[in-house]
Image (tube, rainbow, N blue to C red):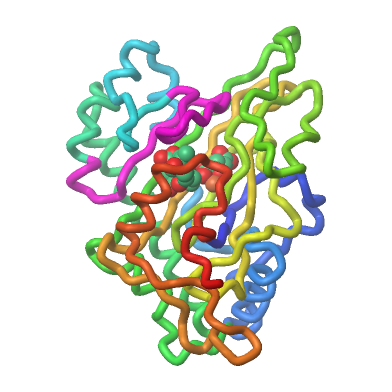
């Protein structure tokens, strides 16, 4: 619902210079206040001095690229996505198409070790070690950010947000998206066009929609990409997360597959999701006479079921809107 990106990342729809940058070495109170401000305005910010080791990030990138460099027939053994696993072009179950291939994993270590056998036959143990360490590191960073949001919002229980992803039954995901280089002479084909969103009409001739516009459904997203540009965020997103009664924004974003670059784009994304049984209901502090309750309460399991029956670009919270 809130996207934090770990450097480097190319953000294009609002000028990269306007993207809020949060330095986690700042005084905590200041950082917390600025994170909340960024989430109220965009639902997106860039994090620096986050403490995630460069070596770990590059080991994770190497494992991901080793997988994407395999012959198609071998990669297909980790698919088709159900929704987890390896997928090409098809996103979800309702007909969304994008110019990418991806690997979608649950962060549960037993899921990883089972799936690793089809992803990295040469050294599944090393793959598991790197993925597990990367997932833990992302979870720690996400937990810290969510606690700062809790503090910045003045929640009585500052762990109210972070407890969802710290729960041992959390439903968090890791996604690796690989956007290969588009040949300049390929015909322009904006095939994943979302008619509800005017922003998607302005693609340039040398780009295609890699991953169509949408907002992420989980509590927090932490995204890292290599230095090939492509991520675009909408400056004024129309969606707000249910847990904060719409006070914070759920940023609408998409990824372009751009031909200007000579190398392919790799993004590695952690989605911090609550346990299936978790009840999603606005924190009392965010419901006031001026801001009455906007959404009915629902469980994460109910929400996921509804979400998988819907197109990527659909505003899923509309299903739960009061009035
Ligand atoms: C079309 C779809 C793909 C998606 C599930 C959905 O029905 C709608 C939400 C999509 C999304 C967007 C953010 C994440 O990439 C994702 C894993 C998620 O949780 O919701 C994807 C889903 C997916 O690719 O399975
Ligand atoms: O690959 C990217 O940079 C963004 C993809 C995305 O938004 C997603 O997987 O939810
Ligand atoms: Fe996303």
Q: Is residue 189 above or below residue 268?
A: above
Judge whether residue 268 is colored magenta: no
Asked whether 144 or 284 is in front, the reply is 284
Left or right placement of residue 21 versus residue 165 in this view: right
Q: Residue 223: horizontal and vertical position, in percent? A: 54, 49
Magenta span: chief secondary structure? strand
Direction top: furthest residue: 185
Label count reads 0
Q: Residue 302: horizontal and vertical position, in percent? A: 33, 58
Residue 254, quarter of the rendered image: top right
Asked whether 22 or 307 is in front, the reply is 307
| Image quarter (top left, top right, bottom left or bottom right) of the C terminus | bottom right
- Identify the residue shown where x is 29% and y is 36%: 127
- Identify the residue shown where x is 70% and y is 44%: 197
Examine the rendering and report whether any part of residue 70 can be seen. yes
Q: Residue 312: horizontal and vertical position, in percent? A: 52, 41
Judge whether residue 89 is colored magenta: yes
Q: Is residue 278 above or below residue 113?
A: below
- Identify the residue shown where x is 69% and y is 37%: 195
Left or right placement of residue 317 versus residue 79 in this view: right
Q: Residue 45: horizontal and vertical position, in percent? A: 65, 61
- Identify the residue shown where x is 74% and y is 7%: 185
Q: Is residue 262 above or below residue 109?
A: above
| The residue stretch that appears in magenta | 88-112
Asked whether 283 or 36 is in front, the reply is 283
């Amino acid at each position: 619902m809130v996207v934090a990106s770990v450097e480097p990342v190319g953000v294009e729809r609002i000028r990269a210079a306007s993207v809020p940058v949060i330095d986690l070495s700042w005084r905590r109170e200041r950082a917390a206040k600025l994170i909340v401000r960024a989430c109220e305005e965009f639902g997106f910010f860039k994090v620096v001095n986050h403490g995630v080791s460069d070596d770990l990030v590059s080991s994770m990138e190497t494992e991901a690229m080793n997988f994407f460099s395999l012959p198609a027939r071998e990669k297909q053994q980790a698919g088709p996505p159900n929704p987890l696993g390896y997928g090409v072009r098809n996103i979800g179950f309702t007909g969304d198409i994008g110019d990418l291939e991806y690997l979608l994993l649950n962060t549960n270590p037993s899921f990883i070790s089972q799936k690793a056998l089809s992803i990295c036959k040469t050294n599944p143990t090393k793959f598991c070690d790197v993925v597990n360490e990367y997932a833990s590191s992302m979870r720690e960073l996400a937990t810290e950010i969510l606690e700062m949001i809790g503090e910045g919002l003045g929640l009585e229980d500052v762990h109210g947000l972070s407890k969802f992803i710290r729960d041992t039954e959390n439903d968090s995901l890791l996604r690796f998206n690989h956007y290969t280089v588009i040949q300049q002479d390929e015909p322009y084909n904006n095939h994943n066009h979302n008619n509800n969103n005017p922003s998607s009409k302005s693609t340039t001739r040398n780009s295609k929609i890699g991953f169509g516009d949408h907002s992420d459904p989980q509590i927090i997203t932490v995204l890292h990409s290599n230095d090939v540009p492509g991520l675009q965020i909408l400056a004024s997103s129309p969606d707000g997360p249910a847990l904060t009664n719409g006070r914070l924004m759920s940023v609408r974003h998409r990824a372009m597959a751009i031909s200007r670059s000579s190398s392919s784009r790799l993004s590695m994304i952690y989605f911090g999701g609550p346990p299936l049984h978790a009840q999603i209901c606005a924190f009392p502090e965010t419901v006031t006479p001026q801001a009455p309750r906007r959404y009915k309460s629902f469980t994460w399991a109910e929400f996921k079921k509804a979400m998988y029956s819907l197109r990527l670009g659909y505003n899923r919270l509309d299903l739960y809107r009061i009035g």
